[in-house]
Amino acid sequence: MGLSLLLASLLAVLLLRYYDLQIKDHQRYATLSDENRVHVRAVAPTRGLIFDRNGVILAENRPSYTLSIVTERTSDLEQLLAELKALLGLTDAEMARFEEQKSQYRRPYESIPLRFQLTEENVALLAVNEFRLPGIEVEVELVRHYPFNEAFAHSVGYVGRINDREQAVIEKERYEGTHVIGKIGIEKQYEDLLHGSVGYEYVETDARGNVLRVLEREDATPGEDLYLSIDSRLQLRAEELLEGRRASVVAIDVETGEVLALVSTPSYDANMFVTGISFKDYDSLLHNINRPLYDRALLGQYPPGSTVKPLYALAGLATGAVTKEWSIQDYGEFQLPNQERVYRDWKRGGHGRVDLRIAVEQSCDVYFYELGNMVGIDVLSEFGHMFGLGHKTGIDMPSEMSGIMPSREWKRAARGLSWYPGDTINASIGQGFSLVTPLQLAQMTANIARRGVSLKPHMIHAVNEREIEVAQNPLVDIAPDHWNTVHSAMEDVVHSMRGTASAQGRGLSFRMAGKTGTAQVVGIPQDAEYDPELLEEFMLDHALFVSFAPVEDPKIAIAVVIENGEHGSSVAAPVARELTVQWLEENPWIVSQADSDESQPIEEEVDAI
Amino acid sequence: MQSDFLRRMPGIGPATAGQERGLLERMHVDPILLLVLYMMSAIGIIVLYSAGAESQYLISRQVAYLGVGTVAMLVVAQIPPLVMQRLAWLAYAGGIVMLGIVLIAGTGAKGAQRWVDLGIIQFQPSEVIKFALPMFIASYLSQRAMPIKFKHLCWALIIIVIPVALILFQPDLGTAILVAGSGLVVLFLAGLRWRYIISALALAPVAVIGAWVFLLHDYQKQRVLTMFNPEEDKLGAGWNIIQSTTAIGSGGWYGKGWMLGTQSHLDFLPESHTDFIIAVLAEEFGFRGVMVLLVGYLLLFIRGLWISYTAKNSFSRLVAGALTFTIFIYVFVNMGMVSGILPVVGVPLPLFSYGGTALVSILIAFGVLMAISTEQETLHAK
């Protein structure tokens, strides 16, 4: 009987145990079972595309194939590697990286990458031979690609692997399943729009982590497609014209504030950064004497030189310090009262009798010494700032330099010194402490072309199909006459026989207003290694030119800065001319409208202010 | 302790001689056993179909084993228990020889040799010895005076130790313990003196510690340790227990439905068609299914014990009781290990786990029970 009782009680133990598991703790085990099989997998959104204003694609997503191996599924790893080596010609470096990753900790059934960016031929070979290569996996991933390579590297920018610093800042959930993030340029600025929002998949997996089916799916929302204001034809033309130069060009649509071209040369292939640039490549870019990584258009700071003269002429007129008719006799020298120092004109012997028009047309320094001395640094500084110099323009790019529009306050704060009258004389021809970026120069020119109405320069024409509009911001109320005077003086720079850029006016079907400039080289970057023979070239003056056209109904404003280009008139001005011609020809409606409006353009604009 | 077990109980005697005997009884078939066996085998095959990922191969093999086993069971049922008593040593000796062959020329899995390859079929001698051993001991003891004398006890222990040692060398600790258990059960049934039992209990801790230090392989120690704390080693030895208890627990009262068990169908459950098949049943048919299974086994045990109580002679009583308890031990150990209250020892669930030798031998054991239940009154086996 005893054994029968034992049997009965042991059966009762079993029954109790199964009761505990199945009834009492059922909920807990049911959860465990679901956690076992159901996994949440992030579905990375497709990054938004970037087009130029005409729909030319500047940044796209291309499928990239990665070959990896799940060692747990291989029967003979050595032989598999040998076969793959024979099939694809694996390099020693690839093998070494594989072995290293294999030796590190990983989850069971986690794949180890063997080769990235497989060619289509590789993919086909692997597909055909897959049956005899157990354990291989070919994974596809969308990888950013920049079809123009170097042409838009500074403006569009690039994406790269998310680094530790970014990892700490980003919203982890939004970036699940995403490996890249915008690093510079538009890619960084509009990261939020381009990235899209992550989706989720509830998948059922088996014990080996194989996904068997999708139980539930919340689709990812792809990033927004951006249509830049950049015109790729204009941009490419500018790159072509600046070939071999350290230079930058900024072109702005006067009517909208849209940036039509944002060029900095030399450049680099943005694609190098997407999947990780090699140390060697990066090092050679970093130490290249021409500094290809440096975005001159937004970060380069140069003395504006004579390009600020039309603005200061306007300041003189607006404050009543000078009139259109007021003139000086220029002997090529200027002295402050009671001071020994002689400020010279660039033209030895001077320009003779000079009024405002001639002063702008021929870039007479002495006239502006006089003008600057009369209006004072406070007015010059105020006008500079008002028209966009010496502070950030607020363009929708991740970084820009603010430049310097010197003033008494600035000098005291930055240098700890008080302002001397001589500082004003230097500033009045855009030298001395003055520093501006090419973007600021273009913005100043556009603001002058718009007769004192400011539009924030911007890079986005449309998000998906929605066009972007920017609020107009009237800067200052200046009499139409003064605008006419300055515009016509700038027109003479290009079209008058004695204009500093008169060569550019010939053969134009429209009227163009411009101003040349020359900036002395302040210093040489410290970190570059110099070839002594090159040193001389690097000491040459920078050549500057700003322009807008057509004068009667301005459409495009351009700033050109060519480092060590020496002559604004012969080196920088032709670039602006070429681009202006191309833009107006590409957009015939502009030209025809300009032609028909030629007789009475100015009055209309005046009313608008 | 168990001496009264052998005493004829008044009023529960067998059908008296000369009474009209039915067809089944004349064919030596026990209808209750047969019915329950087939019901459970049918459930077993249904569960196996799900556990074996709908494999036609597994099912057809298992059905074939069931057929072979049924024939063997019916043949064995025709042998008079007296003949069995005389020939039990043959089954035992055959089993020992085969265990020897396993050690010399066996094939196996996971480092242990458990199989004999007979050309057409493979064969697991330890499954044979677990029934041959209690029969031989019963045969030996039933011809000795009761209660057991010390000398006979020693011989009986030697009879037990030989196959147990051979199985330990395979090595297969779990089966060795169970085989030893099936032998010891006979001693208990035959009526051991209390002092032997007490001294055995006193020696047990010594034996356990000795075995732990000298006999157990590392993986075996690991299994025991894992049972106490499966969470310690989630992906290693603890994996099996975590996954099987999860399968059982997630089945709940109603189960997830036939073929819908996620733990087994997504391969989380190890050995789902052999040792862990109860977890598949528990997951897919829930606690209700487990209770049906337990009721089925309970019927078999009650019937087995009834046969033992009403047996005509001491050999038959001992054999029927021993076989019933042996089957019970297998059921208990298997369901215990899968549900995490016993170490994982690699023991199949009788009538459910896939495997030919185990199924055929258990049916032969039931054949023996049937032979006993339909035995005619004999005079010379007192």
Image: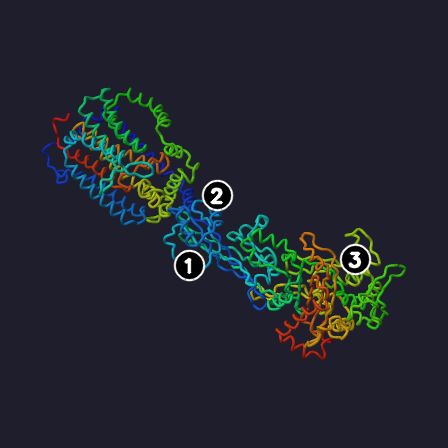
The answer to which image quadrant residue A397 occupies is: bottom right
Q: On the picture, is A436 further left or further right than A76?
A: right
| Residue occupied by mark 2 | A104
Disc number at residue A407? 3
In this view, the mark in front (1 or 2) = 1
Disc number at residue A304? none
The structure residue drawn at horizontal position 24% and vertical position 47%, both measured from the top left corner, is: B60
Query: Which element carries disc 1, helix, strand or loop?
Result: helix
Q: On the picture, is A227 further left or further right than B47?
A: right
Kind of residue at badge 3: Ser
Distance CA(mark 3)–CA(mark 1): 67 Å
Kind of residue at badge 1: Ala
Disc number at residue A124? 1
Q: How many marks?
A: 3
| Mark 3 touches mark 2? (CB < 8 Å) | no
How packed is label 1: few (under 14 Cα within 10 Å), some, or many (20 or more)? Answer: few
Q: Earlier in the sequence, mark 3 or mark 2?
A: 2
Q: Which of the pair A305/B297 is nearer the observer?
A: A305
In this view, the mark in front (3 or 1) = 1
- Same-subunit check for callouts 3 and 2: yes
